[in-house]
Image: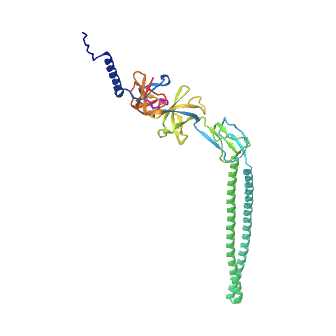
Amino acid sequence: MDKKLEKKFWTIKRIIGIGGGILIISLLIYQLVYADKRTKLNVDKEKITVSDVTQGVFDEFIVVSGVVQPIKTYRIDAIEGGYVKEKVIDGGNTVKEGDIILKLENNRLQMEFVQQETEINRLINDLQNTRLKLKTDKFGLRRTLNDVDFQVSQAKDNNDRNERLYKDKVISEQEYLKTKREYEKLANQKGIEIESQDYQNENSKLQVQQLESTLQHSQKNLQLMRENLSNLVVKAPVGGLLSSIETEVGSSIVAGQNIGQIDDLNGFKMRAGVDEHYISRIFVGLKGTMEFNNQNYDLLIAKVYPEVKSGRFEVDMTFSAKTPEGIRRGQSASIRMELGKSSKAILIPVGGFFSETGGNWVYVMDATAKKAAKRNITLGRRNPEFFEVLDGLKPGEKVITSSYENFGKNEVLEF
């Protein structure tokens, strides 16, 4: 008789099924609870730059490009206009003070000068004639007054004699009154003549003074015109290098036009362009250094030009001690301009990442160097080499400092 076999509950198939179910459920729970859900991107490690986060000294400075210029430049402006008759010295030559550079010609000025000379000669003749007439009239007036005095004297004698005769009743009253009236008439006439002569003398003196004043004014004008004619010869105001002459023989020049410049060879300065971002931090007396022929030279800002053009403004820097030997006008050199004192800080190198993140976050490498995750950071000051890290990074960590342009919004980079 056959015996009935009982069916086992924990069969191999059931164990495998239950185990597989538990595994699937565990994987689902892990994915939901523990798995990394951040977006990822595979990146070729050879195409990125990884830099160390370091603890060091932060020097706040900027590097600008400076151009060598003479310490002083003198403009040569035409005082009078005209045509260039002769170009005596070309640009690039050394000149001494007073050397003739250009000779100009101006027919209008020369004609006005001749006319002024003619007018002065006429005034001189008029003045001489007036003075001669004054002397002649003076003699004539003296003769007239002498005749009047003689007539008055005769009339007085007649009047005195007739007055005595009238008192003695020798002559009639009518005859006496006639001589008396004659005497009074001549006496009054003498007073009028004296007054007339005084007026004529004053009038003649006034005419002479007017002519002398006009002559003096005309002579001053002639002197000014003579100086204007002398200004047609353009001379070097100072000694130095005649760096340029912006004109040629036959060309026309107007008064006040700049025709060249002279560079003072006794010293040089550096003119540098600075980004307008730093305009509030640049001031006279700020220090800088320049390397020339493997030597460093100290500089000081002597002048700040406040006008901003194309996002930049200019400064003039002078050498604190000695000027580099062999330096030439127009040469360019890099200048390290100090903006603040050195201080200890956490540093990361400057890189292309900043243009994408604005310094708000970076990709930080993990310990395996196979992944880099996004991390928020805070950056402070910047110089051409380093950023100052205020928060988010520690010395010894590694960050990606090259451009993030191709990484999109992925939070994790895998290599």
Residue 35 falls in image quadrant: top left
Q: Position of residue 102 (x, y in %)?
A: 70, 41
Quadrant of image for the C terminus = top left
Q: Magenta stretch mostly in which secondary structure?
A: loop
Q: Which residues are magenta?
A: 404-410
How many marks overall? 0
Is residue 170 found left or right of 347 in the rendered image? right
Relative to 369, say whether 104 is above or below.
below
Q: Position of residue 8 (x, y in %)?
A: 27, 16
What's the colour scheme? rainbow
Relative to 192, say whether 84 is above or below.
above
Relative to 275, say whether 120 is above or below.
below
Quadrant of image for the N terminus = top left
Residue 19 falls in image quadrant: top left
Is residue 335 found left or right of 410 in the rendered image? right
Asked whether the viewer can see residue 233, the reply is yes
Q: Nearer the viewer, residue 124 or 134?
A: 124
Residue drawn at 33 percent across, 22 percent down = 21
Residue 362 falls in image quadrant: top left
Asked whether the viewer can see residue 170, the reply is no
Q: Position of residue 61 (x, y in %)?
A: 47, 32
The residue most toward the front is 1
Residue drawn at 74 percent across, 49 percent down = 107
Q: Position of residue 139 (x, y in %)?
A: 73, 68
Residue drawn at 39 percent across, 30 percent down = 392
Residue drawn at 67 percent across, 73 percent down = 195
